[in-house]
Amino acid sequence: MSDFWILLTGALVASCCGILGVFLVLRKMAMIGDAISHSVMPGIVVAFLLSGSRDSLLMMFAALLCGLLTTFLIQMFQNSGIQSDASIGVVFTALFAIGVVLVSLYARQVHLDQDAILYGEIAYVHWNIWELGGVSMGPKAIWLLGFTLFVIAAVIGLFYKQFKLCAFDPALAAAIGIPVVFFHYLLMGLVSMATVSSFESVGAILVVGLLIIPASTAYLLTDRLGVMIGLSVGAGVASTFLGYGAAVLLDASIAGCMVCAASLLFIAAFLFSPSHGVIVKKLRLRQLT
Amino acid sequence: MQNIWLMLADPNMQWIFLGCTLLGLSSGVIGCFSYLRKQSLMGDTLAHAALPGICIAFMLTGIKSIGLFLIGAGAAGLIATFGIGYITRNSKLKQDAAMGIVLSGFFGFGIVLLTLIQHGSYGNQAGLDKFLFGQAASMIASDVITMTSVCVLLITVCTLLFKQFKLISFDPGFARGIGYPVAFLEQLLMLLIVVAVVAGIQAVGVVLVAALLITPAVSARYWTDRLGLMVVLSGVFGAASGAVGTWISASVSNLPTGPVTVLAATLLFFISILFGPQRGLVAKQLMRNRVKQRFNRESESLAKNSLKKEAAL
């Protein structure tokens, strides 16, 4: 049964990240995703210190605030003349450092492990059961992730057209009256939510792997947005399964193995993608000559 | 909080203090060039990519020494740089996505190796995970000597090749035109960044070492428009954050050095962004006020003049 819960958690994380990752990769904001996944750290810690529980809505809210703050600060420094990559670097390292300092100062009083935040403990997911009126409802993490996935799917589904246009041609989107800035922040808010609800299972650092790598894999395989989202989720879920299998075999970190599996899938797509693969292109060139 | 002079009387502490300060200095200096070349996040990627290199170096030899880790991490860093370049050149993915893929892929692999080491039969592995956040207190004299020589090397190379690095930072096309070996210089600069990052990992940790490269350089940019001064200032900022970081983390128990150093650097950054001459927020506001006043004065006198003219008519 524990295998089932772990795989389900992994699949949910991969789906949340896979959907959002597509937009990050298309809008060339992969590193902002990386920054947000680091900088929700102080939000997680503060919410944890306040509420004392790991999977509360307060935590979600705090992380959301942190994510939006990160986006806002990066934008502000960029507007004041700092290169975009440098402003990303300054902001996320500072927030992450605050988070680590808070953890080290208060870690003794509360049960919050630095390692757990960073690499996650997906193996313990099924121990943390949500009970409603004495009836076991399954692991809490599943409910939290399910809720997040629902929100993400609902928002992206409702505003699919707008997100699509903002991803490919923000200038046109602004010209026809779509509030581009609002959608930018909305996307960043969703990324923060996805990060915080998956931090317990894969950790704050490796979330970025599941955000960017499956989406990039999908990007190499197709030229259509809808298909790309599907493929990205598929690649994410596949890497969860492969990664979990490898982790059990090797007795190694599950989250690490998941990201490694995602990287291997990416390498496969990079080499053998029917339209963009390096080897496929070479073969085609040889046929031509 | 311990008195800093009292703390410095301890010879062991002197080494650590010296190590962290030098580290801040050299990463600040190198960071300037990577900032100007718009490669700030490269440091972050290289730092994350160094983790599997460090783990493999440890698994092969079973010894924890900075020298060996430098080699392992350097090799991993070079593979990572190559990987980013290869992905960007051969697919439609942009550089940021390539960086994200390499960063998280390598880091995930590093975490797997780290857990393998922890679960495996490698004795003496305790403290390897300190590399994630850095624990300057675990430095010993030989580490500091390695670090010092690395810093001296970095600063010497930067001083000797200052002119060349300056040119490839601002106008690589022109540099190529007058016959500099630009590709070689770029690779050399990348190698120096790898060295700075790896040396920094011991003190600041994998996740935050990028801040030592980026933050002092950005702060220094607020104070000057001249590269020479910027490099010196950035070095000073880096050294100061390293020193403050060591001092505070040594006097408060259970506080890792890395985050404190980064926060010190961030504080300097905020001071710079507020009070930097010309570019700082305060200076900009003052300038805006002055211009507004002058405009008001001028438009008033203009209005008066035109009134006079009307009266004269």
Image (cartoon, coloured by chain):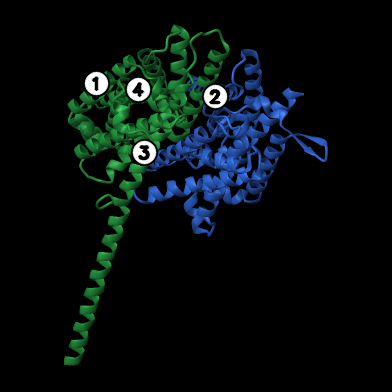
Q: Which mark is residue B153?
A: 1
Give the letter of the chain under mark 3: B
Report which residue position mark 2 lands on: A263
Do marks 3 and 2 share a chain?
Answer: no
In which chain is the residue bearing label 4?
B
Residue at mark 3 shares a chain with residue at mark 4: yes
Give the total of numbered labels. 4
Q: Are marks 1 and 4 on the same chain?
A: yes
Q: Amino acid at mark 1?
A: Leu
Chain B shown in which color?
Answer: green
User: What hue does chain A carry in this figure?
Assistant: blue
Residue drawn at x 37%, y 14% as measured from the top left: B71
Is residue B18 shown left or right of residue B52? left
Marks 1 and 2, how far apart at CA: 35 Å
Along the line of sight, the residue nearer the viewer: A262 or B269: B269
Q: Residues within 10 Å of mark 1 (few under 14, many from 20)?
A: some
Q: Measured from the top left, where is residue A78 in percent x and y?
A: 39, 47
Q: Are marks 3 and 4 in contact (CB under 8 Å)?
A: no
Residue under the image location 30 percent in, 56 percent down: B282
The disc numbered 2 marks a residue on which chain?
A
- Residue holding disc 3: B264
Q: Position of residue A9 (x, y in %)?
A: 68, 31
Looking at numbered disc 2 in the image, what kind of residue is underneath it? Ser
Sequence-first disc among 1 and 3: 1
